[in-house]
Image (spheres, grey):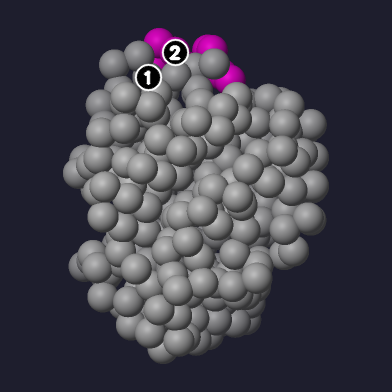
Amino acid sequence: MKNEKQKLTLDDGNIVDAQTPLIVSASRATDIPAFYSNWFFNRLGKGHVRWRNPYNGKDSYVSFDNTKFIVFWSKNPAPLFPFLPILKQKGIGCYVQYTLNDYEAEGLEPSVPPLHGRIETFKRLVDELGLGSVVWRFDPLILTDRISAEDLLHKISNIAGELRGCVEKLVFSFADISSYRKVGRNLSDAGINYHEWSEDEMVEFSRRLADMKLGLELATCAEKVDLSEFGISHNRCIDPELICRLSPELEPLIRNSKTDKGQRSLCGCITSKDIGTYNTCPHGCAYCYANTSPVSARQNYLRHQQNPDNDSII
């Protein structure tokens, strides 16, 4: 499966080439459900978006003519609720990668809603979409002078208890701050003393997590460490098996899908087209890799609000 191209006529009459992805990712780069749901569903109705490559600055176009499935990524997907019937009307399936962390006491996610409300949103989303359609992510697991591995296990246990019966899988990753200089800088600017995970710490944490017997499938996201001895797999966040389970009619189209070459080397996702824009998420998370800084992300969000009908986020 690959993203084919077609000719697309823009509102101004210009004709351009556009990708026609079967699967759309919305989005690894920003929280579209939380902040850009109105924009996204407006563009879905218009039939296309404009996307700017973050590495070379070139614009390209994405047509939704062939789109049959959307994977949403969010820390606050509540704004999606009014729009879910549109997906059903269009025959487009979806699931949500829901990052549900508990860093309230430490202030690492200053603009996400309170934990209790996010848990209730998770439950309501499962009621709307069905069991399996909402994947719980505790991501990333970060160690600081205020957060120990023991604290993280306790936080996970508490949330798992609240979600019992509503969730099948927990996906997690270990904060890899050294790979993102801007993340280390932002944490330092915020006065957060962080600690990088050693492989021994990852293994010990995972052993203890598995021993908690939460009744969940456990998987890591883009991690090199092998945790299979604890029953922990390497996840495929754009997951062909889950997509086929939720939309069986797509099985012939994605049966032989390959991993997405546009992602990190350890990523197991199959090919999709991500339509998000980096440096546009105003959640303000201290550890965020997708923003240059909380200030610039907030400025870009306000810039979007001045032109919400634009064919791209900014």
Corner quadrant of residue 289: bottom left
Crowding at mark 2 (Cα within 10 Å: few <14, some 14-19, many 20+): some
Query: In the image, is residue 142 above or below residue 94?
Result: below
The stretch in magenta equals 246-253
Q: Is residue 228 above or below residue 161?
A: above
Q: Which residue is mark 1?
A: 254
Name which quarter of the figure residue 126 lies in.
top right
Residue 182 visible at all = yes
Q: What residue would you read off at disc 2?
A: 251
**In this orientation, does residue 90 appear?**
no
In the rendered image, residue 19, in percent from the top left (x then y), is placed at 35, 43
Describe residue 222's horizontal placement relative to residue 94 as left or right. left
The residues bearing labels 2 and 1 have C-alpha atoms spaced at a distance of 5 Å
Q: Is residue 66 magenta?
A: no
* Residue 289 vs residue 193, the one in the foreground: 193
Asked if the stretch drawn in magenta spans residue 249, the answer is yes
Where residue 74 appears, x then y in whole percent?
A: 58, 53
SS assignment for the magenta stretch, majority: helix
Q: Residue sitting at 67 percent across and 51 percent down? A: 77
Q: Is residue 235 above or below residue 157?
A: above
